[in-house]
Image (spheres, grey):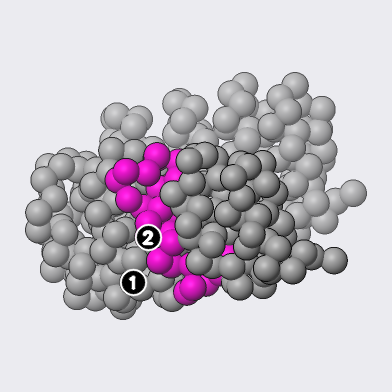
């Protein structure tokens, strides 16, 4: 039986960090109780123990709208990066009900930490249409590629409701910096639900002589999910790229764009024997996403259960289960 809320509230304010930690751990297992203790949990966002601040952010993310104010405090620049990242992730999990956090999340798009920008852009995207105009205003003052990329990603995550952003994104799709161009094109394709004129330049860039450019183009094609089907022929070609990071990204992209499993499973199977660990991992993940229609890959996946790398073995097990093997 869970302890009564009054007891948990008292423990959350206890002098002992161990007692406070135990109370937060109990609330992780009981979201209903967490909802009754939101104010006290929110106070732990300023706990002297940084680890408890992080846990408090996780608890608040389970309380919906009631936890938003506490998570906004977790986004403060005075907080450690790990707490800010968890707060942004929590707001993303709350989604549209976290509308009050839009401004605080927008400020995080300027952060130095890649992970914080990524989680903030994702949260803004999940909040949806209320994020669009604030993000567009921020784009006007962004001078460097990283925040511009994060802003584009947020608008793309919003999807069709971000139609007011099309003009600004078209301008950014002509930027000098490739990462900004790719992010803008990706966002335009998502907002317009897969218009080929925005995906086509990404396919062209996937033929670039620089492997990093090829990889980045694949990442953006993968973000299109099923709308990326128009690029599948090129993605298959890149499964045989000379650079392992490109082969790996091509495999992940096959899974993300939901390529026809019956048609493309055999193109992925050879990558399960690739000498580079990351490529084998990516191939296993893609086949796992394919599920039962990738049954023909089971013999090679089962062989990977004896792979020298533990990560590859784990991914192979997950793929075998997803496909329906024993």
Q: CA distance from mark 2 to mark 1?
A: 9 Å
Q: Which image quadrant is residue 12 in?
A: bottom right
Q: Which residue is mark 1?
A: 100
Say which of 9 and 115 sits in front.
9
User: Where 6 falls versus 286 (above or below)?
Assistant: below
Q: Residues within 10 Å of mark 2 (few under 14, many from 20)?
A: many
Rendered residue at 80%/51% (across/down): 321
| Position in image of residue 218 (x %, y %) | 40, 45
Q: Secondary structure at mark 2?
A: helix
Say which of 66 and 236 sits in front.
66
Q: Which residue is mark 2?
A: 72
| Position in image of residue 174 (x %, y %) | 12, 52
- The quarter in which the N terminus is drawn is bottom right
User: Where 37 falls versus 252 (above or below)?
Assistant: below
Rendered residue at 62%/62% (across/down): 9
Q: Please indicate, yes or no, whether residue 268 appears anywhere in the rendered image.
A: no
Q: Residues within 10 Å of mark 1 (few under 14, many from 20)?
A: some
- Stretch in magenta: 62-88
Rendered residue at 79%/65% (across/down): 2
| Position in image of residue 85 (x %, y %) | 43, 47
Q: Is residue 258 left or right of residue 3?
A: left
Q: Please indicate, yes or no, whether residue 272 appears anywhere in the rendered image.
A: yes
* Number of residue marks: 2
| Magenta region includes residue 98 | no
Rendered residue at 25%/70% (across/down): 132
Q: Are marks 2 and 1 in contact (CB under 8 Å)?
A: yes
| Magenta region includes residue 87 | yes
Q: Is residue 125 left or right of residue 313?
A: left
Precedes in sequence: disc 2 or disc 1? 2
Q: Secondary structure at mark 1?
A: helix
Q: Which image quadrant is residue 274 in?
A: top right
């Amino acid at each position: 039986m869970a302890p009564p809320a009054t007891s948990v509230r008292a423990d959350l304010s206890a002098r002992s960090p161990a007692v406070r930690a135990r109370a937060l751990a109990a609330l992780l297992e009981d979201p209903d109780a967490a909802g009754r203790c939101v104010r006290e949990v929110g106070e732990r966002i300023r706990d002297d123990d940084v680890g408890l601040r992080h846990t408090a952010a996780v608890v608040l993310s389970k309380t919906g709208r009631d936890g938003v104010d506490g998570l906004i405090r977790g986004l403060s620049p005075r907080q450690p990066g790990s707490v800010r990242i968890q707060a942004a992730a929590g707001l993303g999990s709350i989604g549209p009900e976290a509308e009050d956090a839009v401004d605080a999340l927008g400020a995080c798009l300027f952060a130095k930490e890649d992970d914080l920008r990524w989680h903030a852009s994702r949260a803004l995207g999940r909040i949806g249409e209320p994020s669009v105009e604030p993000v567009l205003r921020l784009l006007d003052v962004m001078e460097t590629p990283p925040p511009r990329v994060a802003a584009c990603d947020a608008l793309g995550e919003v999807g069709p409701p971000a139609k007011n952003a099309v003009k600004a994104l078209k301008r950014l799709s002509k930027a000098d910096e490739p990462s900004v161009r790719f992010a803008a094109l990706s966002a335009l394709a998502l907002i317009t639900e897969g218009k080929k004129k925005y995906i086509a330049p990404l396919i062209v860039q996937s033929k670039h002589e620089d492997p990093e450019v090829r990889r980045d183009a694949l990442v953006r094609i993968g973000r299109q999910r099923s709308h990326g089907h128009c690029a599948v022929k090129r993605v298959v070609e890149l499964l045989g790229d000379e650079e392992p990071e490109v082969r790996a990204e091509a495999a992940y992209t096959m899974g993300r764009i939901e390529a026809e499993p019956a048609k493309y499973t055999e193109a992925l199977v050879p990558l399960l024997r690739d000498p580079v660990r990351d490529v084998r991992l990516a191939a296993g993940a893609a086949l796992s996403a394919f599920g039962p229609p990738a049954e023909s890959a089971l013999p090679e996946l089962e062989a990977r259960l004896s792979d020298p790398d533990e990560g590859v073995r784990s991914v192979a097990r997950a793929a075998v289960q997803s496909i329906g093997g024993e």
